[in-house]
Image (cartoon, coloured by chain):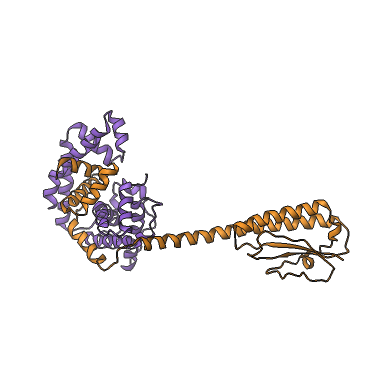
Amino acid sequence: MGANQTDLELVRQVQSGEKKSFDVLVLKYQHKVINLIMRYVHDHDAAQDVAQEAFIKAYRGLKNFRGDAAFYTWLYRIAINTAKNHLVSQGRRAPATDIDAEEAEQYGGESALKEYGTPEREALKDEIQLAISAAIEALPGDLRTAIVLRELEGMSYDAIAVTMECPIGTVRSRIFRAREAIDKVLQPLIN
Amino acid sequence: MNTSKQEYLSALLDDEAGAFERARLLTELKQDDELGQKLNRYALMGEAMRTKQGVVPSDSRDFLAGIQVALAAEPEYTEAVVQLADKAAARSKSWRHYAMGFGAAASVAMAALVGVWLLSSTDSMPSAEQTVNATATKATPATVRLQTARAGEAATERPLRRINLADSSRIRQDNQHMDHATRDALKQYVTLHMQHRANNSVITSIQASAYSQ
């Protein structure tokens, strides 16, 4: 996975004094980081706290970030260490094995790492999952293929354009329209 | 929010927006909360698609607010802070570089000394005692002297570090009768050493001195 130019630009902005740029990184990676931490800390509220702590540590450590690795790979390591430290502070043993950062990008979840949430939260989670699945199923074939290739296969727009035999602008438009269709069912649920 | 902007926002999440659109959107994202929430939801749906177990959405505004409160007291970065961190990293790198250089030079020195010893041991002219002194001085970077003096006379210049091989290996040779092979080997070694010395300031330079009657 190559260096993410958007992340790199945001990091450079933070490093040159634009604190607000860090908010964009938080908005972008919030769910990914919480989900990652949930594999260690199975309580959702605790996972949120640990994720916040990880982001705060990341901000403090950004002065040392020089872009040798992708920002998310770097953030991932901080999140894992923060989660492990949390477990140790709770008198629990951290898992001996980690999930590779690259693998974590496309991680599908495992039954051994279940969350023990409240019934309401579990119900909301199921509802969201069903709504997203239904929205994807309802998409026209070309939009569905484009979003699946992007989100599940992690393909670049170039690669999707080659696969779907269409211009790259069409790929961008299809992915956007697919997201908008999903957002229509997602937004009312999370608000 | 117009469609074009949202389309580029979607591309931005995938790092597929062009440089111009990226710069424009990053500026807007810092001012437009609604645009930020949209980015957050786009990210959430991707995560939900990848995670078979499902994702519990956390309130992005609360989550972000918690971080903002914690970081409120933190000073903003300045170029100077980041440059200092870079310099610190560079310094630790340069020490590793020096250490590697020192190891390489030590190996060269050892090989050369063994070579000198082997060559000199074939000659049988024990009229003078040759010592090889090692000196480290920054002020004399590329000068190497083969000093000839009577046995028992001390070298006129005081070396900072001295390796006296006379005691350990008993090299005995009259410098005036030093054969060409030995002289060439010694010269080659000294040249190599001084090249290293020029590049690595912590490496000990070696001054070869020979004592003769």
Residue at far top of view: A165
Q: Point out residue B92 in the picture as x, y percentages from the top left corner.
A: 49, 61
Q: Point out residue A164 in the picture as x, y percentages from the top left corner.
A: 27, 30
Residue at far left of view: A188
Quadrant that contains the N terminus of chain B: top left
The answer, for residue B14, to whether it is visible in the render is no
Q: Point out residue A42 in the picture as x, y percentages from the top left corner.
A: 26, 58
The answer, for residue A19, to whether it is visible in the render is yes
Q: How many marks?
A: 0
Residue A58 or B82: which is nearer the viewer? B82
Residue A147 or B32: which is nearer the viewer? B32
Q: What shade has chain B been given?
A: orange
Q: Which chain is purple?
A: A
Is residue B149 shown left or right of residue B77?
right
Q: Quadrant of residue B103?
A: bottom right
Residue at the (29%, 66%) spot, across then down: B75
Is residue A51 shown left or right of residue A74?
left
Q: Point out residue A150 in the picture as x, y percentages from the top left corner.
A: 27, 39
Residue at the (19%, 52%) spot, across then down: B36
Residue A85 or B173: which is nearer the viewer? B173
Residue A166 or A155: which is nearer the viewer? A166
Quadrant that contains the C terminus of chain B: bottom right
